[in-house]
Amino acid sequence: MLASLRSVRRLTAQGSLLFGPFPHFSRTLPSFLFPIPPSSSLCSAAATVRPSEDSSAGCSILSRHVLAAEEVPEKFHHMDTYDAIELALDSVVKVFTVSCNPNYLLPWQNKSQRETTGSGFVIHGRQILTNAHVVADHTFVLVRKHGSPTKYKAEVQAVGHECDLAILMVQSEEFWDGMSSLELGEIPFLQEAVAVVGYPQGGDNISVTKGVVSRVEPTQYVHGAAQLMAIQIDAAINPGNSGGPAIMFDKVAGVAFQNLSGAENIGYIIPVPIIKHFLSGVQENGKYAGFCSLGLSCQPTENAQLREHFCMRPEMTGVLVSKINPLSHAYKVLHKDDIILAFDGVPIANDGTVPFRNRERITFDYLVSMKKPAEKALLRVLRDGMEHEFSISLGPLQPLVPVQQFDKLPSYYIFAGLVFVPLTQPYLHEYGDDWYNTSPRRLCERALRELPKKAGEQLVILSQVLMDDINTGYERLSELQVKKVNGMEIENLKQLCSLVEGCPDENLRFDLDDERVIVLNRNNAKLATSRILKRHRIPSAMSTDLMVEKSTFFLGQ
């Protein structure tokens, strides 16, 4: 399987790792993270994710500077493809996945089962590294090593959908006979050669494709909708290559994971720092730990008048704090209109970039993303003309509306034919590839812009009305947010379920968007619920996670 940048179907209110649920710098992030005119289309992401022409034009010049300045030996500019093949034969495996995606419009059932293939490779500790999108929503996973007709059952040990990485484990001792692990290397320099090894479509045997590094910079990860470091190469990466190693000399330079459709021989690999961050988090916590965020929305300070207004001296550079996520530690420390001058002692330029290697620059959220959860960072800040230093604790931040939701069933609650669900972007994706324009406008804007005010908060919506005598006249009130139940403001779906199930009053009142109101007789509605469930062959009035909550609620009474 291969994630293609032209197949991006999700917008992210998170912007970048550093900036939490807010848009990042317009110069460094894809344009589809910002408001889009009604005439625009998001069925293709090639134009929005492709870096600027200016950076592309200077690529070859920059690479020569890098190679010259770093005095990279001539042998490093080339690699023997046969060496890559020899390394890969005992390490790279083909992954066979059976998956079943949930249906967010009918959350009590799944979509049709499908079979896909991908690649993976053995690393230390008898682990197989592959892409998260290769095993997303899996029900069964098999792996096959080179030269063997046998497929072995594999278990998914850990998944990081944000960084599109996963670890597989195989219990069979027979599988490990003759297998060897690959070592992780470093980020390659521009124009260094790599060989991508895997099992792309068009054949069943192992394939090796050779290319060179074209660019190293933060890129939109299609699968997890995160902005993380990626390496662009000119090797052809096709469906099935996903999860295979990109080998440089005798070590792994990255993991193949997506391409740029509509362009010839432009592929992307996940670099070693992202891989090591994922692996160390799994090793220390037993599961995927996530990538850190400051939870800020920042504005460049490239305009001289703007810098003068905020009392920045000529030698000062930095970015302006526009918004702060209420759930972040920065919310307690930083203020709107603060100027962030430096992160951990590294000066931040007016365009939000920091030095990276030799004569390269990169957005400073890369520094943030490489921090471990709960780790602190030292920020130098200009506030009202005075410089301050603040220590801020970092950690992963969840948006109000989840951008992706894999390997779990959607939540739902049905009462009198009213289907309540928490708003998620996968729900909006059910409206098709052009969901930004075809989904309900108000819900779409809230999914991309609104911030959580407290932990565990959800936007609960009435997704549809299953028609019955009890709800006649309410059928046009679907796709609206539920604001209150009997005067109580709704924080999440579990609370709504508890309020309805535990209501002592004769009538239930639901206050929706646009000042719409639904009133139901509680006893009649309960009888109607059983009738409606039977008619539509729905096994339960609520999802499994709410059943646990309901049991806890009644035990506490």
Image (spheres, rainbow, N blue to C red):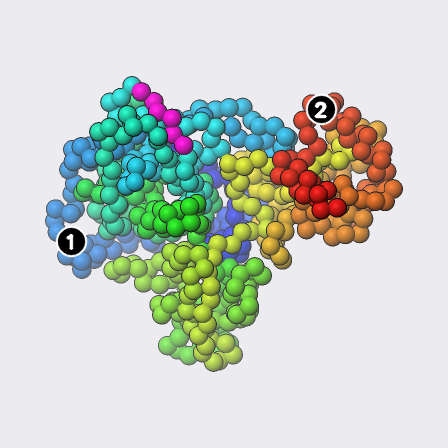
Q: Vertically, is 352 above or below 209?
A: below
Type of amino acid under label 1: Val
Are discs 2 and 1 less than 8 Å apart at CB?
no
Q: Residue at x 47, y 30 (%)?
A: 138
Asked which secondary structure carries label 1, the reply is loop
Q: Residue at x 85, y 33 (%)?
A: 524
| Residue 238 lies within the magenta run | no
Give the residue pinned by disc 2: 536
- If the image is split into quadrants, where does the N terminus sit? top left
The label on residue 499 is none
The residue mark sitting in front, 2 or 1, is 2
Local packing at callout 2 (Cα closer than 10 Å; few below 14, some 14-19, many 20+) is few
Give the residue pinned by disc 1: 72
Q: Residue at x 12, y 51 (%)?
A: 73
Please report the bounds of the magenta region as a residue range.
150-155
| Residue 151 lies within the magenta run | yes
